Structure formats: structure tokens, C-alpha cells
Amino acid sequence: MIDACGGVRKIHYSEAASIAALIPELLENEEEPTISDWTALELTTDETEGQGLRRTAVQDAISVDGTVLLLVKSNVLGLRTLGALIWDLTDSWTTRDDLLHRVIQEIGDHPSATELLHEAIEELLISGVLESV
């Protein structure tokens, strides 16, 4: 569907009020749109009882140019590097310690790795894409 609609376009704007005027111009542009690399992501979530963290069910998920876009209760949520990795690694129950170990394996260690992971997890819990038991 994304390709059939002309691909994904990224818009940078400083004033939200002026974006509406730019949309028709963007759509009328006769140049061939640049179609971003995108991939549909697996939506499965471990349904077994468990403890720790796991991602919640979402309506849809795609990866576009390194950003994971989730459709969550009619809202689109974009996850970049750490958030996207956490979402990917929590398809089944995992502990915070195990998640920290796996994140460090994937992207390397950082002096503040524990704090950064904790902050990212809290944001994902608040946004409803992770659950904790």
C-alpha cells in the first residue's frame, strides 16, 4: 500500500500551522517520488504468562529508513535506535537485566547504559507499547 500511494515522504517543518498549505504542493509534484526502504515487521507477541517486560500488541508495525513506526490505538509512534531495538527484543518476556545485556551486545556499551535503558523503557511503558509485570 505504501508503494502504491507514492512512498513515504518525510516533511520537516517548524510551524505546524503552515503544514496544511504544503501538502497539496507536495502531492502535485510531478517528479518521481523517492520511495524509502521499508519493511513490514512481525507483530507477534508472546501470549504466555510471564514476568518482566514484553511488548504489547499493536495494529501495525513497519521499519522505514531505520525508524520503527507503530500503529497503536489509532496513533502512530516512531521509535528510533534504542526504542526500536527495545521493541524488537521484547517480543517475549524478558528481564531488565537480560534486556540490558542484549542491547549492549547489539549496539555496544555506554557509561550510562543502565540509565539510558531505564529512561527508554519508562517512555515505552507510558506510551503503551511495553508492559511490565
Image (spheres, rainbow, N blue to C red):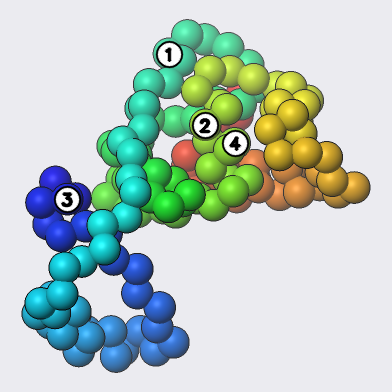
**Which mark identifies residue 86?**
4
Residue picked out by circle 1? 47
Amino acid type at mark 3? Asp
In the image, 13 versus 123, the foreground residue is: 13
> Which comes sooner in the sequence, label 1 or label 4?
1
Kindly report the distance in space between the C-alpha atoms of the residues bearing marks 4 and 2. 5 Å
Label 1 or label 2, whichever lies nearer to me, is 2
Query: Is 83 displayed left or right of 78 in the figure?
Result: right
Determine the residue located farthest toward the top in the rendered image.
48
Query: Is 70 displayed left or right of 21 in the figure?
Result: right
Identified at 76% across, 34% down, the residue is: 104
**Which mark identifies residue 88?**
2
Amino acid type at mark 1? Glu
Q: Give the crowd class for mark 3: few <14, some 14-19, many >=20 residues within 10 Å.
A: few
Q: Are marks 4 and 2 in contact (CB under 8 Å)?
A: yes
Q: Residue 70, how many percent across, how many down?
A: 37, 45
Query: Is 36 displayed left or right of 24 in the figure?
Result: right
* Disc 3 secondary structure class: loop
Kindly report the distance in space between the C-alpha atoms of the residues bearing marks 1 and 4. 18 Å
Kindly report the distance in space between the C-alpha atoms of the residues bearing marks 3 and 1. 32 Å
Q: Are marks 1 and 2 in contact (CB under 8 Å)?
A: no
**Is 97 located above or below residue 69 in the figure?**
above
Kindly report the distance in space between the C-alpha atoms of the residues bearing marks 1 and 2. 16 Å
Q: Quadrant of the C terminus?
A: top right
